[in-house]
Image: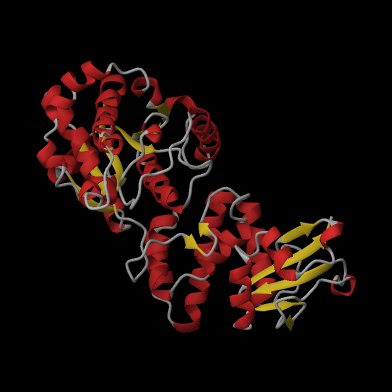
Amino acid sequence: MINVLDELIERGYIKQYTHEEETRKLLGEKKITFYIGFDPTADSLHVGHFLALMLMAHMQKAGHRPIVLMGGGTAMVGDPTGKTDMRKMLTREEIEHNVQCIKKQMSRFIDFSDGKAILANNADWLMNLNYINFLREVGVHFSVNKMLTAECFKQRMEKGLSFLEFNYMLMQGYDFFELNKKYDCVMELGGDDQWSNMIAGVELIRRKENKPAYAMTCSLLTNSEGKKMGKTENGALWLDPEKTTPYDFYQYWRNVNDSDVGKCLAMLTFLPMDEVKRLSALKDKEINEAKKVLAYEVTKLVHGEEAAKKSAAASEALFGQGSNMENVPMVTITADMANAQILDVLVYTKILPSKGEGRRLIQQGGLTLNDVKVDDFTRVLTSEDFKDGFVMIKKGKKKFYKLSIE
């Protein structure tokens, strides 16, 4: 039997373990239950979550049972990891709304049928905890001295770390403890930035229950310069098509650096590794073929095959030899905006994040209407601009939009 750990290592997922040899033996000999936590701080998942979902999907394909843990309780506190300031506190209603939105996205990646996966929410046990009992039963197993050495806390000590956030590690550790009792969950997976929190759960189970428990972290998705991938000029690269269109999603992966293609193919698609290696070895202009495969495969996983085909066709029409412009993203404005300044229109349609960004783009010669460069900040749309019922907007070198009137 092939050990899923070997595949995960080959694809570049695994960063570190709590117990490497025990983990290898466990995954090679048994079918286990494991979990990954997702705090619902927004109403959509983003690319960072997608990497965790891919890790979970590989484990499920190998026969292991995943628990998707929604952080309905921990989101009330906020994870200080990687944050320079305290996160905005959400209401219960906001969190529940986010949970429901994210649940819909999960089923595209994880098979929940016939008990093959479990969807849990830590609000079920965290929201009604007795504080004194929690301190006596859980807090007693945590050393404050040791907690203060954790990276997630060290980064915030100078600016200020609230006691609210200081509790997050205990809560995440307690999540693992509860899942272990309820579902015999023996392993937590997560991003490498969660290492300290994950160790807390492993040690809590081993000390309190005298049972084996394990944690394994995934490498964060970074580019060749060590910066997190998935950031765009408009913010995060979301999995929700209303926040990031399938076309923009496709174009992001179509335009990754040559040096990042292999990593993305290995970690964000299910292509066999022999094919990943073949595509990654392409050089110069040929690497563009690998980028097309990457963009298509990732978009297909997130948005479905039809959206991937339309995005690929639109990209080919604009940058290749194609001529079908039907799939270029269409944005609409109301009739009363048809004679407004172009910068106002582009901010309204969210093609531009701000008028300041639009002015910089115009100064750099990066904005065109119907193949004519815009060089005037006060340029006004007119009825003559709407040829064939729409205006073709080009932003930068590779972003195209069709602008029409409702």
60 left or right of 337? left
Nearest the viewer among 368 and 264 is 368
The total of numbered circles placed on residues is 0
Q: Residue shown at 22%/53% (left/top)?
A: 158
Tell me: residue 331, above or below residue 67.
Answer: below
Nearest the viewer among 62 and 220 is 220
Locate residue 261: give its quadrant: bottom left
- Quarter holding the N terminus is top left
348 left or right of 134? right
- Quarter holding the C terminus is bottom right
In the rendered image, residue 35, in percent from the top left (x then y), is placed at 33, 35
Q: Residue shown at 36%/65% (left/top)?
A: 227
In the rendered image, residue 212, in percent from the top left (x then y), is placed at 15, 30
Q: Residue shown at 42%/64% (left/top)?
A: 275
Residue 40 visible in rendering: yes
Q: How is the image coloured?
A: secondary structure
Residue 274 visible in rendering: no
Q: Residue shown at 43%/25% (left/top)?
A: 115
Given the current orientation, which residue lies at the most extreme front position? 159
Locate residue 104: give its quadrant: top right
Tell me: residue 298, above or below residue 98.
Answer: below
Tell me: residue 394, above or below residue 298.
Answer: below
In the rendered image, residue 299, in percent from the top left (x then y), is placed at 55, 56
In the rendered image, residue 37, in percent from the top left (x then y), is placed at 36, 37
Nearest the viewer among 325 and 48 is 48
